[in-house]
Amino acid sequence: MRRVVPFVAVLVVGFILLFTVVNYLPPFGSFPQRKLGAFENQSVGQRILENAPRETGSANVVTSVVWDYRGYDTMGECTILFTAVCGVLMLFLATRGEE
Amino acid sequence: MAGMTTIVRTISRLLFPFMLLFGVYVLIHGHLTPGGGFQGGVIIAASFVMIWLAYGLEQSPIGFKLFRTEVLEAIGGLVIVAVGVVGIVAGVGVLGHVLPLGTLGNLFSGGNLPLLNICVGIEVAASLILVFYAMLRKIAWDEK
């Protein structure tokens, strides 16, 4: 009994998730279009996909989004990484050994 | 950090240069193929961590200088911020394209993107190497 209940629960939840994914997600390769007043049928993703190679000169659209359209955000991420590593080094190497 | 058996040591020693090469490939082709600075840096760091886990920190065959790695990390972050400031000075906005865009698909194309990818790759690789080195060093100190 203690094994059957979690098994059934996992099966039910998995079935619900699978049902949702199969029925309600947009098909592979497409993304939901924005339905907001004046922005009808103007998807940001579609615009970026069409214009990114021409505007940024990068064949990889992900890189052009990360470093060009959202470059400021990524620059902040780099400083966050730097700060985090400074903290880790301070924590772990604060008490130096004999060396 | 005692290290592992001879089999693991040999395989990781033979695999190390290829992993490093693949990391550098992912890094400098970041604007052409899937991947980029973050991913390539993580692969480079993983190759170092693999050697350290296989050999142990004391007997590892790779030369590692803590200070140089810290300087490399700082230089990577500094160049990224400097490129952003250069964009402001040149009048194209933060991180705007100062270098020419070039032909789509060439290795030297995409304006600032290859430079930024390489810099962030160096920074991420140095950061993760430093984090893992610090943790392994702390474990080695605690074992003494």
Image (spheres, coloured by chain):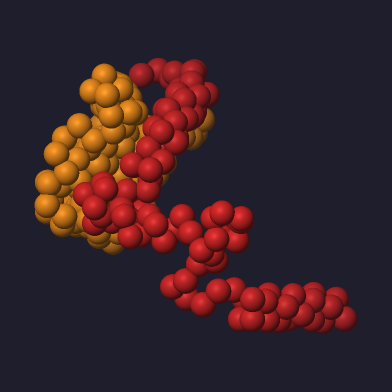
Chain colours: A red, B orange
Residue farthest front in this picture:
A38
Q: Residue at x 24, y 42 (%)?
A: B113
| A57 or A85: nearer the viewer | A57
Residue B34 rendering spot, x and y as whole percentages? 30, 59
Instruction: State which quadrant residue A11 falls in.
Output: bottom right
* Placement of A88 over or under B100, stated as above or below: above
Q: Residue at x 20, y 46 (%)?
A: B110
Residue A38 rendering spot, x and y as whole percentages? 56, 54
Q: What number of labels is visible?
A: 0
* Placement of A45 over or under A17, stated as above or below: above
Instruction: State which quadrant residue A85 falls in.
Output: top left
Residue B127 rendering spot, x and y as whole percentages? 37, 34
Residue A30 rendering spot, x and y as whole percentages? 47, 71
Observer able to see residue B23:
no
Q: Residue at x 47, y 76 (%)?
A: A28
* Placement of B57 over or under B13, stated as above or below: above
Observer able to see residue A60:
yes
Quadrant location of the N terminus of chain B in the rendered image: top left
Q: Residue at x 44, y 58 (%)?
A: A45
| A7 or B121: nearer the viewer | B121
| A41 or B105: nearer the viewer | A41
Instruction: State which quadrant residue A2 falls in.
Output: bottom right
Q: Left or right: where does residue B23 sit relative to residue A41?
A: left
